[in-house]
């Protein structure tokens, strides 16, 4: 199965940017497990200054609604979601739902700028 997105971590020292790590995720459940309490998001070092969630372009273009495939960026704190509009909006909707149910780790809420 091909990954649907990668999570890229980067840090800056002065004017030099370092790409720390890139983690492929194969489905939305892997992403939400990563940002849930006890998930990998809690192990992000303090040096990380930016997290980029990069959604891959779908294998097949949306011929019914080409607006769905327009590339967009959504910034929440130091987290940037890049990819097709439909994927970013769907993920943002699920983030709102999971935040309301307390299913996001404190560390993820912190990096997206949400107060506890």
Image (cartoon, grey):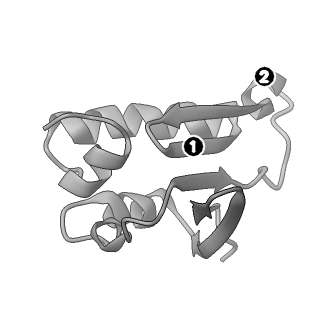
Residue sitting nearer the eye, 47 or 22: 47
**Residue under the image location 24 percent in, 50 percent down:** 104
Q: Quadrant of residue 42?
A: bottom left
**Residue 26: image location, x then y, percent:** 57, 69
**Residue under the image location 82 percent in, 56 percent down:** 59
**Residue under the image location 73 percent in, 28 percent down:** 68
Neighbours of disc 1 within 10 Å: few (<14), some (14-19), many (20+): some
Residue sitting nearer the eye, 31 or 9: 9
**For the residues marked 2 and 1, what is the alpha-carbon distance in whole angstroms?**
20 Å
Residues under numbered marks 2 and 1 in contact, where contact means CB atoms less than 8 Å apart: no
Read off the residue under disc 1.
80
Q: Is residue 114 visible?
A: yes
Residue sitting nearer the eye, 30 or 9: 9
The relative height of residue 104 versus residue 95 in the rendered view (above or below) is: below
Q: What number is the disc on residue 12? A: none
**Residue 76: image location, x then y, percent:** 46, 35
Read off the residue under disc 2.
67
**Residue under the image location 71 percent in, 31 percent down:** 72
The relative height of residue 107 versus residue 75 in the rendered view (above or below) is: below
- Left or right: 106 in relation to 97: left
**Residue 19: image location, x then y, percent:** 66, 70
The relative height of residue 71 versus residue 9 in the rendered view (above or below) is: above
Which part of the image, by quadrant, shows the C terminus? top left
Secondary structure beneath label 1: strand
- Mark 2 or 1: in front is 1
Secondary structure beneath label 2: helix
């Amino acid at each position: 199965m091909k990954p649907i997105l990668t999570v890229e971590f980067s840090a800056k020292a002065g004017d030099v940017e370092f790409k720390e790590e890139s983690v492929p995720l194969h489905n939305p459940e892997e992403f939400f497990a990563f940002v849930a309490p006890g998930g990998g998001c809690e192990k992000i070092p303090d040096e990380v200054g930016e997290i980029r969630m990069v959604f891959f372009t779908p294998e097949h273009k949306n011929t019914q609604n080409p607006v769905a495939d327009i590339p967009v960026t959504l910034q929440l704190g130091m987290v940037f979601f890049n990819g097709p509009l439909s994927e970013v909006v769907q993920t943002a909707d699920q983030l709102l739902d999971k935040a309301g149910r307390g299913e996001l780790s404190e560390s993820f809420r912190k990096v997206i700028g949400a107060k506890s």
